[in-house]
Structures are given as C-alpha cells and as structure tokens.
Image (spheres, rainbow, N blue to C red):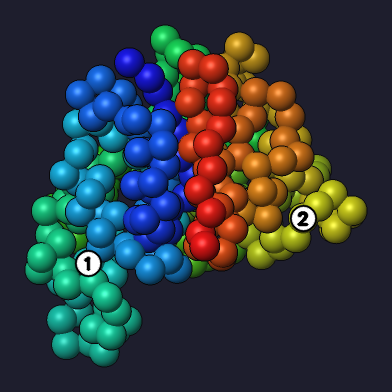
C-alpha cells in the first residue's frame, strides 16, 4: 500500500499511464494524489479526465486554476447558452462531461493528511496561513462550487482573473475568498512587506526576483514544521530551489519536459519524458 504524488498532468495521458506502469501502481491498494491542472495545454485532456474519474476511488486531487477554468466554462455554457464563448471551439463536449464536471466541483483546493503529515494544494499555502485557516476557505469554496447556485459559482470562478488580491484580517471579508482561490491555485510570488499576492510575475531563478517580491515558499506560514507541503503550478522551478519538506511537483511535461511522480514512503521520484 503506497502513496504517490504526481505533478500537473495537463492532458499528458500517455506519460501518466507510463508512470503508473513504471511504479506498478495497484488501484486496489495504492493512492494517487494529484496536484491539480489535470487539463489543457497537453494533447489528451479528455482521456486524463475519463481515466481519473473511472479510478476515482484510488485518486485524490486538488483543483488547479485550469481545472477551475474548465468548470467556469461549463457554467458559462449553462448561464449564457447563446453567447459565442470559448467552449464552442474547444475540445470539450460538456454534455458528455457532465458527470466528470460534477465530480470535479466537489473536489477541494486544499487537502491535509494528518497521519502521513503532509498538506497539498495546487500552487502553495498563502503566507501566515495554517491548516485550520486553509481548511476553512477550502471548505467554503468547495461548498459554493458543489452547490446549485450557478450564478454564484460563475461569480466565484471569475475571481481567478483578477490580479489584485489582498488579505483582510476580518475572516468574513468577501475579498478573502478571492485571495484564497488565487492563493491556492495561481500564487507564485508575494509582496515582501504586505504579503499581498503578485499574480503577474513568473520568472525564476532567484536572481530574477523583483526586489519587492518573495517566492511564497520563503514566507512564513503556520503549517506545523513536521508537515511537508506538496504543490505544483510553478513549472520553471523544475522541482528544485525549494526548502526542506517542500515538494515542487510540476516539471513542465506539457511544455516538452517531463512528468514527475513521487513515492511518499521512500521519497523516490520517477520521471516520464514528454518525447
């Protein structure tokens, strides 16, 4: 019985299957944790969705920004059926994907495993946040996404396209949902003194930092030190340059690099090249 993590799949179905075969993944005993961004950019998003949904008893995912955008397009179709929107020219047939979309919108954007001592989200843990605050906003967003209030779902998901994200210490402040959804799915850098999110700057390595910015994983959080933090999203890290007990899983397979899988029990990594 093993626990595996895989980085952003982005429609790279062949590489995912090859990795699972490489580690002799047992769907009756093993568990696969996915750092989000199941779809887009790569060649076989539909196949990835169908495969993970068909094996969902063995799969635990956190939603990434591309997964949330897929859900947003689905509700755009429902709310504005006559609008000339992107999905009509996309690879997605939402009628055939309805069950999968309903499954996706019941998934969280943050997970914690108290027994194995790790937390996982797509892009990371916002500065100064701990497990309880992360769970609070993850549960709140999950409750909205899995509801029947389509207009509210669409409104919440459109918050991903707003780059001005500031934290408010008032827990019930409505802007904090915007901060949370972007912090868990799009975050790379924070402003040094305020810890506001900078959602535009993406460069790496360290010498390319803007002077007023800091990578989120170098800020202080309240996750217990005995816990590890697993995340994806930042492919230019290539799995490197992060502190101890941080695991950057996105290694840019959809950009022609490789897909990375980590076996938790012995921390061994496995790779599958795009080509």
**Could you say where residue 206 lies in the image, as x and y percent from the top left?**
84, 49
Element type where label 2 sits in the image = loop
Q: Please tell me how crowded label 1 is: few (under 14), some (14-19), or many (20+) other residues with Cα within 10 Å.
A: some
**Could you say where residue 260 lies in the image, as x and y percent from the top left?**
53, 43
**Could you say where residue 124 lies in the image, as x and y percent from the top left?**
57, 39
Say if 118 sits above or below 144 in the image.
above
Q: Residue at x 45, y 40 (%)?
A: 6
Q: Mark 2 and mark 1 in contact (Cβ < 8 Å)?
A: no
Q: Residue at x 59, y 58 (%)?
A: 257
Question: Is residue 100 left or right of 33 when viewed as pictured?
Answer: left
Mark linked to residue 8: none
Q: Residue at x 66, y 64 (%)?
A: 200
* Nearest the eye: 212 or 249: 249
**Could you say where residue 229 lies in the image, as x and y percent from the top left?**
57, 28
Question: Is residue 270 left or right of 101 when viewed as pictured?
Answer: right
Q: Which residue is mark 2?
A: 204
Q: Residue at x 63, y 59 (%)?
A: 199
Q: Please tell me how crowded label 2 is: few (under 14), some (14-19), or many (20+) other residues with Cα within 10 Å.
A: some
For marks 1 and 2, give the CA distance: 35 Å
Say if 152 sits above or below 190 in the image.
below
Q: Which residue is mark 1?
A: 75
């Amino acid at each position: 019985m093993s626990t595996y993590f895989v980085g952003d799949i982005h429609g790279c179905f062949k590489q995912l299957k090859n990795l699972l075969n490489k580690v002799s993944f047992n769907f009756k005993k093993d568990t696969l944790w996915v750092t989000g961004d199941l779809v887009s950019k790569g060649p076989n998003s539909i196949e990835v969705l169908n495969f993970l949904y068909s094996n969902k008893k063995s799969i635990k995912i956190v939603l990434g920004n591309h997964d949330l955008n897929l859900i947003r397009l689905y509700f755009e179709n429902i709310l504005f059926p006559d609008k000339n929107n992107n999905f009509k020219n996309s690879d997605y047939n939402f009628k055939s994907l309805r069950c999968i979309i309903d499954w996706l919108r019941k998934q969280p954007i943050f997970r914690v495993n108290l027994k194995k001592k790790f937390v996982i989200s797509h892009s990371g843990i916002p500065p100064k946040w701990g497990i309880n605050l992360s769970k609070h906003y993850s549960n709140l967003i999950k409750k909205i996404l899995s509801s029947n209030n389509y207009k509210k779902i669409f409104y919440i998901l459109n918050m991903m396209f707003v780059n001005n994200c500031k934290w408010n210490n008032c827990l019930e402040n409505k802007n904090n949902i915007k901060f949370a959804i972007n912090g868990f799915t799009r975050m790379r850098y924070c402003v040094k003194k305020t810890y506001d999110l900078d959602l535009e700057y993406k460069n790496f390595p360290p010498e390319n930092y803007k002077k007023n910015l800091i990578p989120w994983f170098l800020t202080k959080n309240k996750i217990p030190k005995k816990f590890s933090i697993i995340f994806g999203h930042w492919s230019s890290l290539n799995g490197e340059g992060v502190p101890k007990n941080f695991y950057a899983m996105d290694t840019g397979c959809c950009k022609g690099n490789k897909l990375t899988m980590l076996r938790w029990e012995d921390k061994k990594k496995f790779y599958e090249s795009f080509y």
